Amino acid sequence: MNKIAYSAFIAFVASLATLVSISALSSSEHDTTGGENLEPITLEQLAEHDSADSCWKAIHGRVYDITGYVPDHPTDEEVILEWCGREASEGWDNKRPGVPHSPRAQERLERYLIGRLVDEEGEPVETSATAPVATDFRSDTGTAQASLPPAEDERLARAMLGLPLDGHYRGVFTDRGSIQVNVTFDLREGRIHSLEYRHLSYRGVDYLALEESDERYPVMLQYRQIAERFEGEPITRIFALYQPERVVDDIDGYSGATLRGAKVISAIRDALNRGVYAWP
Ligand code: HEM
């Protein structure tokens, strides 16, 4: 192998090794269970180191003494000092709302590791991944800039991705000028709740007003079953209604084929297209 090719090979191997070690570090980022050998540190002890003279931070169950790093942090000092002496995972995971620090920063952080966070009984303090901070006053220069509260951020992001937002929905299936299916439901975290029919009719017959003795009454029961069986189901499950016999029982010999599951899908999709009717 000539010299240039050999150097290129060594550089390649070295960069691979760096990548592997960085990913190993980032995967340990949320590890709160390991590190038994680390010095146990309580919230009380942590709280004593809350200034530029001595700045300790607990991040995902581990404690770091970052006093020496504060002047080097690429923002105004107050941004990072604000989190000294306390549980700082929220700040770490949200250097900007929803944006965590880079693997490079994680690598840097590990240099300052001094212990693990424990409660008064010496048990590890669990910290899960945190939601974006409620208000963020950082800008490029690290100074005042208000941002949307997290709920609004989330709504905006979901809307931009075309994902349905949580809320109360209403929608209809109409054929030849008359409404046949009118539904209402709530969507919570992408799941259907409280699906109800505000109107259900076919060829002039109001199914919601049918007497039990009516021969079509079992079909109405099947529609009701749909509503019950979708309680808490992900919205994507509605497509099962293309084969309603998978969803409803064969009541009194009425097969799923009698039921037009596609009308319910259509009404639900109409509701989603219209958007949130009322916020939760
Ligand atoms: C926990 C409180 C902390 C907050 C609120 C915070 C906030 C920020 C902000 C606002 C930036 C600049 C904006 C940006 O790059 O997008 C930044 C960048 C950075 N911070 Fe922090 N920081 C914190 C803790 C730390 C700690 C403890 C370290 C390392 C010991 C660190 C290392 C870095 C590095 C290396 C960057 C450059 C960008 C990156 O690699 O992600 N930060 N931080």
Image: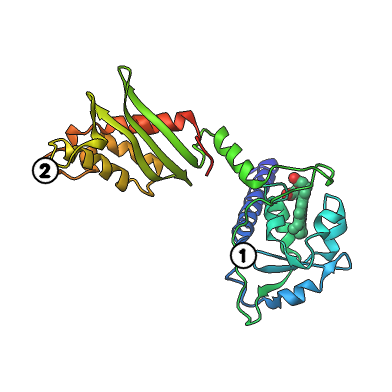
Name the front one of labels 2 and 1.
2
Residue shown at 60% from the left, 78% from the top: 123
- Which amino acid type corresponds to the residue marked 1 in the rendered image? Thr
Q: Is residue 15 depicted above or below 127 in this figure?
A: above
Q: Taking 24 as reference, is 182 left or right?
A: left
**Could you say which disc has been placed on residue 179 in the image?**
none
Q: Is residue 212 above or below residue 46?
A: above
The quarter holding residue 79 reads: bottom right
Which one is earlier in the sequence, the residue at label 2 or at label 1? 1
Tag 1 residue: 127
Depth order, front residue of 37/81: 81
Which residue occupies the foreground of this view, 16 or 203?
203
Disc 2 residue type?
A: Asp
Mark 1 residue element:
loop
Residue most extreme to the top: 176
Does the closest atom of ligand 1 sit within 8 Å of the Cβ of label 2? no
Q: Is 227 placed left or right of 12 in the picture?
A: left
The location of residue 222, given as percent across then percent down, is 22, 41
Image quarter where the N terminus lies is top right
Which residue carries the number 2 mark? Answer: 252
Please rate how many residues cluster around mark 1, counting C-alpha atoms within 10 Å: few if below 14, some from 14 to 19, many from 20. some
| Residue 32 point in image, percent of width and height | 60, 68
Q: Where is residue 43, by image quadrant?
A: bottom right
Query: Can you see residue 243?
Result: no
Q: Residue furthest left?
A: 253
**Identity of the residue drawn at 80% across and 42% down:** 145
- The CA distance from mark 2 to mark 1 is 54 Å
Residue 154 spot, x, y in % from top left: 59, 43
Q: Is residue 38 above or below residue 197?
A: below
Question: How far from the left and from the top, in percent, is residue 204?
Answer: 23, 24
Task: Residue at 66%, 81% (x, y): give it.
Answer: 120
